[in-house]
Image: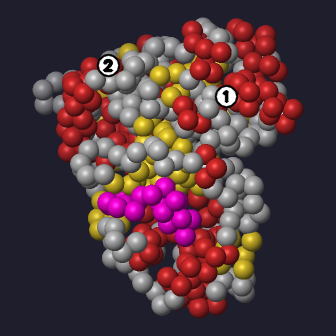
Amino acid sequence: MTPSSPAPATIVLDIGKTNVKLALIDADGHTLAERRSPNAVVPDGLYPHHDTERIWSWMLDAMRGFAQLAHVGAIVPVTHGATAALVDEEGLVLPVLDYEDELPPSQDAAYRALRPPYSSSYSPLLPAGLNLGRQLAWQAHAYPGQFGRARHILMYPQYWAWRLSGVAASEVTSLGCHTDLWQPARQQYSSMVERMGWSALFPPLRPAWAPLGPLKPELAAQTGLPADCKVVCGIHDSNASLLRHLQGAPRTVLSTGTWVIAAAIGMPLDGLREAGDMLANSNALGEPVACMRFMGGREFGELAGAEPVQCSADDLQRLIARQTMALPCFASAGGPFGGRAGSVAGPAPQTAKERYALATLYCVLMSDYCLTALGACQGEIVVEGSYTGNPYFAPLLAALRPGQAVLSSDDASGTTCGAWMLAHWPATGGAAIGRATGGAPADAAAVADAADAADAATAAGGTAARGTAPLALPGWAAYRERWLAAL
């Protein structure tokens, strides 16, 4: 690049549970181009699994197009959690398991004996494969030959970074996402990792923003991307949304997508309860974050229908007046009411707009419930992600929480913004996070250095959040009380 050339752009690979997105972001954080594709699970084979080869081919094709639009300096992978890849030198030794697959009940008792106590992992026992440790234990038992060939256990963002760069790494945000493999408070692997003999399979820990290496030469030639394009380690998606909120006064971030995750930054962990499906994730600095979540994107879709039509305030008011309410839950995977069958009380919605209104009311009430149960009753609430596209979600939530300011992100993907920030993170932060996530609790100087880096990157990315005026519809507060009483 010559001195007069524009600053390099960044490609963000964002693999959500429902969709895959590739975004080209310029040096100022503006989106230049974007490609999307459904993230379909392959139902056959050894077990339901992610179609990694289809994603790979689609991604390389999109990158060829992006290479014609800008000089790309970095690629950052960001993915959903509870997912890992078992690889040898050549590639996958087993397909990447879908965490929604119902693993054999015959494994339940044995896994309960293997997993660490909640008091150390802050990872509740979850259904299907939502505890990554359970997936790995089952794969090791069911396919010992293939498992035995594995050289690395790669968390999902780092699997894609490895395919792009050839460098294997581990990273705390995916390790600390209800996996049973990590101790968030102590910032080290759990007892289960040693008990299962997996310690050597996890590559060295690297910070989320660490450049692992340049793009493989054959991939640079295949895509037309620069030979010096760096591949960044990558991050868990909801933690990407947290990046620009890590500093300053304590606040709670509602990261919304397939999952709605309430992350109470700065809150002590002693109020977390396994019975309430509460957990501690690890943020990019390696610090534990008290969280509670439900599968809000999936549940909204179940209630609103396959072809949702945005409602009006009148539709919302009509359902409130009729006392039509949805009672949890409408997804099979986790959340505070996991295992219950959802139902609709009162007169059923009659139109697509009323179904959208019912889904909105339900997701606001569920979010409010999680915030209260978590104890996140002080400080700002920042809504990130897909719910920012619903004009009624944040105003209705603000009406239920008059003591807290509710802000809504200006972009629909805090995940993309956070991933872009990783490519622009100051080098000083990389050294700090290397100390902070090196397998022992961080010293104060290391955390302070990383915090300074977070401040600088947040300033570059911008807070991009606006205040929300409450939408206090008549009867809304009483509707919530009746909903709570019906739970």
The residue shown at (64%, 50%) is 275
Amino acid at pointer 1? Arg
Instruction: Specify whether residue 369 is painted magenta.
Output: yes
Mark 1 sits on what residue?
Answer: 115
Mark 1, mark 2: which one is toward the viewer?
1
Whether 182 is drawn above or below 402: the answer is above
The residue shown at (20%, 34%) is 452
Residue 430 in the figure: left or right of residue 478: left
As measured in the structure, the alpha-carbon distance from the residue carrying label 1 to the one carrying label 2 is 27 Å
Amino acid at pointer 2? Arg
- Circle 2 sits in a helix, a strand or a loop, which is it? helix
In the rendered image, residue 269, in percent from the top left (x then y), is placed at 45, 43
Identify the mark at residue 216; answer none if there is no mark. none
The residue shown at (75%, 13%) is 146
In the rendered image, residue 435, in percent from the top left (x then y), is placed at 32, 19
Residue 254: which quarter of the image?
bottom left
Task: Report the span colored magenta.
Answer: 365-383
Q: Is residue 385 visible?
A: no
Instruction: Specify whether residue 227 is painted magenta.
Output: no
Identify the mark at residue 435; answer none if there is no mark. 2
